[in-house]
Image (cartoon, rainbow, N blue to C red):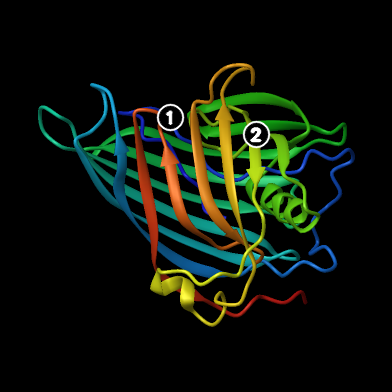
Amino acid sequence: MIRFLPIPSVRPVVAAAVFLALAGHPTLAEPAGLAPMAAHHATYKLSLLKSKGTNAPASATGVIDYVFSGSSCDGYTTTFRQLTELQPAEGEARLNDLRSTTFEDGAGTQFNFKTTTKNDAETVSDLDGRARKLPDGKTSVELKQPVGKAALGTDVLFPTEHLRRIIMAAERGQKLLSASVFDGSDTGKKVFYTLSVIGAPTVAPISDPAGKTDSLKTMRRWPVAISYFEGKKEDQPDYVLSFDLYENGISRALKLDYGDFVLAGELTDLHVTAQASCR
């Protein structure tokens, strides 16, 4: 599942999907009956879908480049880059450049992250840190850049682990999920509260050429909409992420709703590689 990182000059947007909030949180060593996570390289073309209000851009273009690799034995590595150019109603266009590299072990107990955010070539955020689950179930964060520490509490999942949870929930026919998610974005110390809605599965034909590849054209997918909250869930969400999620973890038909405007992400290129096997 693709991760979405902040556009600080507009408003924060985070990364990831939601996980199923189950007691105990068992490890995710490829649960029986689930398709293995697909190692893949995906490219998405961004465009402005909707815009409203005085703070909304007049136009927007961009691209997301996303690479996912690894296995439940060796852990999972992702590299991500999002370039977004926003043209306001008045003034010059702004270019936002977001780059991230992460590693998560197969048990979902350790998460390393490094993220750089630039606006018009000027670095506005540079994060380098590690989060890990402690024996008491709590999660701790250690930052090397900037130096710092944080305690995140219990029942917090990392990106690949909660992606497996949402696929498990979809397989079971569950429609609503809530969760606390940490992906190393924003300040590198923040937990996001999420509420997800999962639609009915489908294998209906689609229009984007990348989604017609042999690895996807007969695979089930579910429409998913996730609302992200920085505070209590009684408040309005800070943003909403929507997408089609395949059972092997690949996503298409992205929608990034920032409130004042919505970006659409079309899957334009996809390369699926051989799944790494456990040794």
Amino acid type at circle 1 is Pro
Q: How many marks?
A: 2
Q: Quadrant of the N terminus?
A: bottom right
Q: Where is residue 48 shown, x and y percent of the image? A: 29, 44
- Viewer-closest of 76 and 2: 2
Q: Is residue 234 above or below residue 8?
A: above
Which numbered dot is residue 21? none
Q: Quadrant of the C terminus?
A: bottom right
- Viewer-closest of 247 and 271: 247
Q: Residue at x 49, y 44 (%)?
A: 114
> Toward which corner of the image does residue 203 lie, by quadrant?
bottom right
Q: Where is residue 258 shown, x and y percent of the image? A: 40, 32
Task: Looking at the image, tell me whether mark 1 or mark 2 is earlier in sequence order.
Answer: 1
Mark 1 vs mark 2, CA separation in Å: 17 Å
> Toward which corner of the image does residue 184 lie, by quadrant?
top right
Q: Where is residue 123 shown, x and y percent of the image? A: 30, 35
Q: Are marks 1 and 2 in contact (CB under 8 Å)?
A: no
Q: Nearer the viewer, mark 1 or mark 2?
A: 2
Which numbered dot is residue 195? 2
- The residue identified by callout 1 is 12
Amino acid type at circle 2 is Leu
Q: Residue at x 69, y 47 (%)?
A: 162
